[in-house]
Image: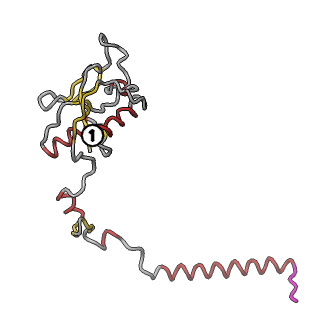
Amino acid sequence: MIQIKISNKLFFTLIGILIFSILGIVAYSQSSQLPGPADPSHIADSIVVNIGGVDKTLQQVIDDGDITSYYIPSEIRQSSGHDGDFDADADNNGFGYPEINQWVKDKCGGEYHTCDPIEILRYIDETGDNPDIGWVGGGGGWDCKGWSSKKGGNDNPDYGLSWEGANNGFLSIKCNQERAVLCCK
């Protein structure tokens, strides 16, 4: 059995550190002779994606309008009429946003939602079609106080946002008036 004196432990520790350092220096010097990491800016001239079975460069996809960075409704429907108060209708399923969301699904179809003003404008810009008149989800105080308020009564009702056609655009309408809800898909 080998016995190391305490003074020899320090010596062997220093020898171990020295050997480890020498191996590190050798490994580092060898790695500088290897090729560096790939530089993507010099490997490819373009990014190719497959759209509907056709390979296109990313620029072709953008130029062809195959992708958009925002949602454009494919269809806008008009529900039957309703005032701006969706507060516990006859079915008593809820009030406000849950109630108008259910109304839209029941009247327009399960894949529809209440259109917002930006969706209306994008739809017109994309298709050239002018949607019918109806309530839109304005938010920010333009949704008949969350679709649950006619609290002002007929004398002083709250207001909601309605699309009134290309000639009139969006108008603030008293919530006690009946309008269709515009449903976007």
Secondary structure at badge 1 equals helix
The image quarter in which residue 117 lies: top left
Q: Residue at x 35, y 14 (%)?
A: 152
Colour approach in the figure: secondary structure
Farthest residue, direction bottom: 1
Rendering coords of residue 115 (x, y %): 27, 37
What is the quadrant of the N terminus in the image? bottom right
Q: Is residue 91 left or right of residue 116?
A: right
Residue ID for mark 1? 108
Farthest residue, direction front: 90
Number of marks: 1
Residue nearer the viewer, 151 or 56: 151
Residue nearer the viewer, 31 or 90: 90
Instruction: Give neighbour class at mark 1: few <14, some 14-19, many 20+ (Cα, 10 Å).
Output: many
Residue nearer the viewer, 106 or 77: 106
Query: Main structural element of the magenta stretch: helix, strand or loop?
Result: loop
Q: Is residue 149 above or below residue 8?
A: above
Rendering coords of residue 110 (x, y %): 32, 44
Rendering coords of residue 77 (x, y %): 22, 39
What is the quadrant of the C terminus in the image? top left
The image quarter in which residue 125 lies: top left
Q: Is residue 80 left or right of residue 89?
A: left
Q: Which residues are magenta?
A: 1-5
- Give the amino acid at mark 1: Cys
The image quarter in which residue 20 lies: bottom right
Residue nearer the viewer, 59 or 45: 59
Q: Is residue 119 above or below residue 26?
A: above
Rendering coords of residue 6 (x, y %): 86, 77
Q: Residue at x 19, y 56 (%)?
A: 65
In the image, residue 110 lies in the stretch drawn in magenta: no
Q: Is residue 124 left or right of residue 34?
A: left
